[in-house]
Image (cartoon, rainbow, N blue to C red):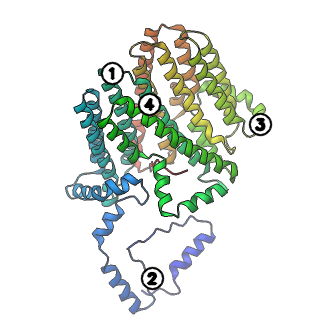
Amino acid sequence: ALAVDSLADRITAALDADGADVHRPELGSLVAAVPADPQARNEARQAVAAVDDEAVRLKSAVKARDGFVTTFFISPYSRYIARWCARRGLTPNQVTTASLITALIAAGCAATGTRGGFVAAGVLLIASFVLDCTDGQLARYSLQYSTLGAWLDATFDRAKEYAYYAGLALGAARGGDDVWALALGAMVLQTCRHVVDFSFNEANHDASANTSPTAALSDKLDSVGWTVWVRRMIVLPIGERWAMIAVLTALTTPRITFYALLIGCAFSATYTTAGRVLRSLTRRATRTDRAAKALADLADSGPLAEAVAKGLRSTARRLPGFTAPAVALLGGAAVVATAALTGFGGPWPLVAALVYVLTSALAVARPLKGALDWLVPPFFRAAEYLTVLVLAAKADVNGALPAAFGLVAAVAYHHYDTVYRIRGDAGAPPQWLVRTIGGHEGRTLVICVLAVLLTATQFKRALTVLAVAVALVVLVESIRFWVAAHKVGAPAVHDEGEPA
């Protein structure tokens, strides 16, 4: 049939006029045409026949936007590994699982504490990352997309990295160097960086009148070749980060590796957060109820904060727009500083934790639609995680920091799981789960109560019990949810390392 007056274009124009979100994929080397006569149709058929389908599939298997290390050192050959896997009937989930197993073996090698173990760990960590790239490329090459696969890919990335931190800490301990505080600090910093990414994007992705001079400058920089790669590298995405960790593990010590990781992540976190604050302050945007709901879910407020917030709503409405992030920051800083500056077992961290409950409630007492309200969830994460870290370090008993590492890992899993559900338009975890594990303010209060009532040894045991209990509850519910979502085909989305 012959097209008359480009029917496809008229339909697209009508959809645009109706306000529909029309997706216009880039064709690249593919061919699309609406021929108006037999000659044009023959020319279009010849152009289609000239396309190298296999070359297009291989190119399309690689993400168009990726980090420098991934783009130039992994993807040039990992796409062929993906094709090899596809031709042998392997699935992306199998490759994802192989990547996890490889990373866990790498963590085990690091835990030996020997130079040979560290070298093997670095090599295996790179191999794990190659497989991590291959699973997504295999999914795109063979068109095998699934909700379960997206969740496994996102969740296993965190599990691999944080298990490797634990392996390095165990290896250092075998050599007489205790770096558990650095390992936990690295996990806290990395998790808070991701929460900044998630909160900012959720707060602004559907905002109306979403313009900013800072954003315009960012777009301009993305049009210049060398600045694109500098900006992608400076945020230390997973490829650059894992390459640095692998090389330093093989050549130096765990302590040096963690120092470099903390410095690099702190710099990139400062860069990205400062850029987003500038965007928010210069942006004219009206944030939606959906964005406010997403931020409230990311805040992870428990029954204590919710109950107190109900009584503070009228007061919160009369306060300035910057109140929510300001009181979240001040309350979190107060409880962390008090725990750090007072002796273990004293009452002052408990007093500060009670104040933290009040400030947390005030921060969420009204919808989070302010320009900087996306900072509230990261401030809550930092306050809770750092309180656990500081009190465990203050206990000064063997095993307290590893127990704290396990507890923060379990809670962080819950927070990542919340993000993946929201990004997949599946909603936040059920309220019963949030209430069962107490919310961020409830857990912080419980930790401070335990530090006051228990001896250092008993506190270590309590942290271990809490870690196991939280991990069991959130893992069982999370696995149940994602398996069920996979059966009905719900989407799941994950990414990291976006430029500021």
- Tell me, for residue 173, which label it has, or none: 1
The mark that comes first in sequence, 2 or 3, is 2
Between circles 2 and 1, the one closer to the viewer is: 1
Q: Is residue 152 above or below residue 176?
A: below
> Whole-Å distance between the Cαs marked 2 and 3?
56 Å
Task: Give the crowd class for mark 1: few <14, some 14-19, many >=20 residues within 10 Å.
Answer: some
Q: Position of residue 322 (x, y in %)?
A: 72, 39
The image shows residue 197, relative to residue 118, as above or below, that is below
Amino acid beneath label 1: Ala
Q: Are marks 3 and 1 in contact (CB under 8 Å)?
A: no
Q: Amino acid at mark 2?
A: Val
Q: Which image quarter: residue 13?
A: bottom right
Q: Please tell me which residue lies in front, 67 or 383.
A: 67
Of residue 175 and residue 79, the one placed in the foreground of this image is 175
Rate crowding at label 4 as few (under 14), some (14 to 19) or many (20 or more) other CA atoms within 10 Å.
Answer: many
Give the mark nearer the N terminus: 1 vs 4: 1
Name the residue that disc number 3 marks.
317
Q: Which mark is residue 474?
A: 4
Indicate the position of residue 104 as horizontal and vertical percent values.
29, 35
When asked about the image quadrant of residue 42, the answer is: bottom left
Provide residue 66's location: percent of width, then percent of height: 42, 55
Tag 4: amino acid: Val
Horizontal side of 375 relative to 495 (left or right) equals: right
Mark 4 or 2 closer to N-term? 2
Q: Quadrant of residue 29?
A: bottom left
Estimate the spatial distance between the alpha carbons at disc 4 and disc 3, rounded to whole Å.
Answer: 34 Å
Instruction: Name the N-terminal-most of marks 2 and 1.
Output: 2
What residue is drawn where x is 45% and y is 32%?
A: 186
The amino acid beneath tag 3 is Arg
Question: Is residue 109 among the parts visible in the rendering?
Answer: yes
